[in-house]
Image (cartoon, grey):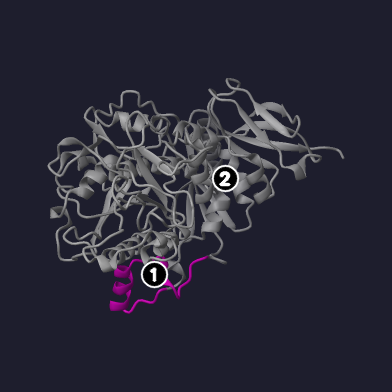
Amino acid sequence: MRKIYFFIFSFLVIFTSASAAGYYFYVQLTDKNNSPYSISNPETFLSQRAIERREFYKIQIDSTDLPVNPNYISELADKGVFIHSTTKWLNGVTVLMKDSTIISSVRSLPFVKFAQFTGITNEHPASHAPPKKINHTDFNYGVAETQINLMNGKVLHQNGYLGKNIHIAVIDAGFGGVNSIPAFELMRNENRLIGTKDIVNPNSDIFSEHGHGTAVLSAMAAEINGTFVGTAPKASYLLIRTEAVIGEYPCEPDFWISGIEYADSMGVDIATTSLGYTVFDDSSMNYTYSQMDGNTIRASIAATMAYEKGILLFNSAGNDGTKPWKYIGVPADAEGVITVGAVTKDSVPSSFSSFGPTSDNRIKPELAAMGTHSAIINASGATASSNGTSFSTPILAGITACFLQAAKTIYPTHTLDELKDYIFKSAHLYSNPSTRLGYGIPDFSIAYDSLIKSDLAKLSVENNKMTHKLLINKNSSITLKIPESYQNILKKANLYSISGQLCGNLEIVNRTITIPSGDFQTGIYILKFEKSDQ
């Protein structure tokens, strides 16, 4: 009888596979060997509250507490499955796939003990492949439309990248009304306000402090369709207060250091700061232009460290362009930081925008966005316009969060340096940077196009593979260059859909493969190379 039931079950799976959207499998892993996690460092995978609870009940932390080995997860994903969920206690992974035959390659992995079919679904959770293009043509940005159009930022939103799962730290002077203003209601209701921290006064109510941070946050997070939509309306936000407002002293840059370190500990992807320090109430404490080298003032050193730890950090250039001190300040001078100047809606430099370069002659600011008559939501909850690099900075930081989401989705191996390079090269002054705007206003339509056509050489050489995953947009042609070391080895490539269907044969001509626009539907494809007989 057991054999009969098994036959009927197998037949059911085969019969329904023709129309079902996806298949769940539970994958049992053999071990947690060579994991980057260690029982001796529980703070890397358990919250302090969880550790204290174990200590209170005298519960030992053991291997079941260790997360599933991320290297195993990565190898599973490389097989073309979606990692739906994991269990660290049982050391297993639930995967989802549209083509159930892929499971045979999963079962062949040395660390897989078994894979068990567990169900069928017609729902589509977010996957490692780029989501289908989402039509947001009815997304009415209201008064914020001009500032996003200036950077061609809509292209990211229209392709489904709204900053989802990107965590942004906003370091400022206070966030008056953010807990009640209607423009932030979706952020609050969707639990995307992930935390607050007041470095200046831990006992204060950060939502009753200065409203400058509120306006800064609104440029990214506010969402009232038809009235105001920010540049990263689905990102998550960590609000940190480091600016005392009353008085200006060097302790505040030190507060900022504590703030960025806290942001790092919370795992943010991006941090944006509309603060800068040059002169103080006590003139004997003033910084000098010679100190604007990124390596002298503590806060600037910390800013570079934040970037080295994987945070994409934005800082306003400053509003001193017409003042005796006309240069950028701290930590805008730091290496690794993207310092942002301001322009008008007509791309003219804003008169107040501070100048570069750094004292050691590095290009600063690097980029610019709309900072004259920028659309914001003020601390009263009303739409308004305001001037300053305080606002050009979050406008740019928000749309970059969407770009980062796209990059993580399409090619997760990209470094922050590479991502910055895409954005810098898209800017209108890239070939002739200026002391006021640096490389200029980025064009995210160009940056996104460059991202989806990323050079074949990088993935092939680094991973030493004869296959390459890529995103094809039917409205754009793609030209990929074969690494020179492979030019006498590879003769042609076969293009397959993500489900394994052969879609076309592509010839290699002069070390390049060209995929004309319109030949294939938009989606993820796999190039599999054939070796020559030589």
Q: Which of the two residues, 388 or 283, is positioned nearer the viewer here?
A: 283
Q: Which amino acid does label 1 sit on?
A: Glu
Looking at the image, the residue that sits furthest to the top is 518
Residue 410: which disc?
none
- Residue 65 image-quadrant placement: bottom left
Magenta includes 54? yes
Look at the numbered disc 2 and give the secondary structure of its residue: helix
Q: Dot 2 corresponds to which residue? A: 3
Is the residue 520 above or below the residue 414 in the image?
above
Q: In this view, does 60 lie to the left or right of 240?
A: right
Q: What residue type is labelled 2?
A: Lys
Is the residue 272 above or below the residue 455 in the image?
below
Residue range (magenta): 36-61
Q: How many numbered discs sit on the rendered protein?
A: 2
Residue displayed at 58% across by 39% down: 454
Residue 28, percent from left and from top: 52, 56
Residue 400, percent from left and from top: 41, 42
Magenta includes 96? no
Residue displayed at 76% across by 36% down: 530
**Pointer 1 and pointer 2: residues touching (CB < 8 Å)?**
no
Quarter placement of the C terminus = top right
Q: Dot 1 corresponds to which residue? A: 43
Neighbour class for label 1 at 10 Å: few (<14), some, many (≥20)? Answer: few
Give the Cα distance between marks 1 and 2: 49 Å
Q: Which of marks 1 and 2 is in front?
A: 1
Neighbour class for label 2 at 10 Å: few (<14), some, many (≥20)? Answer: few
